[in-house]
Image (tube, grey):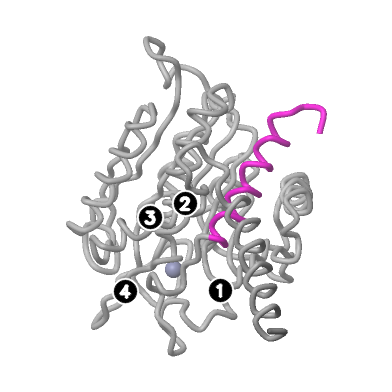
Amino acid sequence: MKQRLVLVLIAAVVLAVAGVVGWRLRNDPSGNSLGQNAYQHTAAILAIGPRPAGSQGLAKVRGYVKQELEKSGWSVKEQAFKRNTLKGEVEFVNVRARFAPKGTDAWAAVPEGILCAHIDSKDIPGMEFLGADDAASACAAIVEIGRHLASQKPEQAGKLELVFFDGEEGFSDSITTIDGLFGSREYAGVWRSQPKKPRFGILLDMIGHTNLRISLPVDSPEFLKNHVLAAATQEDVKKHFSVSDFTITDDHVPLNQVGIPTIDVIGDFSNFNWWHNQKGGKDDLSVISAESLDKSMRVTIRTLDRLFDKDQ
Ligand SMILES: [Zn+2]
């Protein structure tokens, strides 16, 4: 009898914990958490297959992102250009999205902020490299944050531009300032000569992996680093965020160079065995966690709240 009572008590505790967890995750009218929705977008992107720059797979992923953003009311534009690369001439296409009430021109005003990620996956010869967290998950998170803001905070959505950079990955083993960052360099060029520019950028890269570990580059713009870390504290996920002791070459660099202070919210990739499938792990859906996505997205949304609220 006593044993049965213990079992009943254990079952009650398990159910109570599951209930609390379920309640915390279900903060969206659809019944899904933001992280669960982003997980589904990640799975949909990966189902298309590899998406290196210039590939059919990437064209399909662009189509998916465009369709999902337009569904939630965003106006989508493509920025196409050709560049000579180590693999010959490649056509790159950035995807840009803005939000404005129907009947008004979403592209007329300068946005206050940019939320961005890279949409291509690295071309690794002899391997079907999917780049689940590098960076399908970040694109998925931005699609879902876009939907969330359009329905819950349309005023904020109207002050943002969402950008999906092509060609972040280099064609050689590493990213350099000439091999890689093709899309962000081209995009930054749009703003270089503009007298009025967005006042901040947030780049997401590798933000949905299990056992979330985000490591901000040491040279991040101070005010953005402070906002992200404070947002992580407010969301009770600070233990997943740290500041690394090195700089990182990523899509935030060209934006910072043209005078748009931009932070790279990036996973601690040098310690991941799945990064570029280099150390035995595979960067596929198995490394993605809806809960980690949820944490990164809540911190991003909270950071935007802080940046748009002049009192914070
Ligand atoms: Zn990569």
Q: Residue type at mark 3?
A: Gln
Please tell me which of labels 3 and 2 falls first in the chain: 3
Please tell me which of labels 4 and 3 falls first in the chain: 3
Circle 3 or circle 2, nearest the eye: 3
Q: Residue at x 63, y 51 (%)?
A: 24
User: For numbered disc 3, what is the local secondary structure?
Assistant: helix
User: Between marks 1 and 2, how big is the CA–CA gap?
Assistant: 15 Å
Give how far across and how far down residue 247 sits, in percent. Answer: 65, 66
Q: Residue type at mark 1?
A: Phe
Q: Residues within 10 Å of mark 3 (few under 14, many from 20)?
A: some
The magenta segment is 291-312
Residue 13 belongs to magenta span: no
Q: 118 or 241: nearer the eye?
A: 241
Q: Residue at x 41, y 11 (%)?
A: 104
Quickly name the residue at label 1.
269
Per the rendering, the mark at residue 40 is 3
User: For numbered disc 1, what is the local secondary structure?
Assistant: helix
Instruction: Specify the quadrant that holds the N terminus.
Output: bottom right
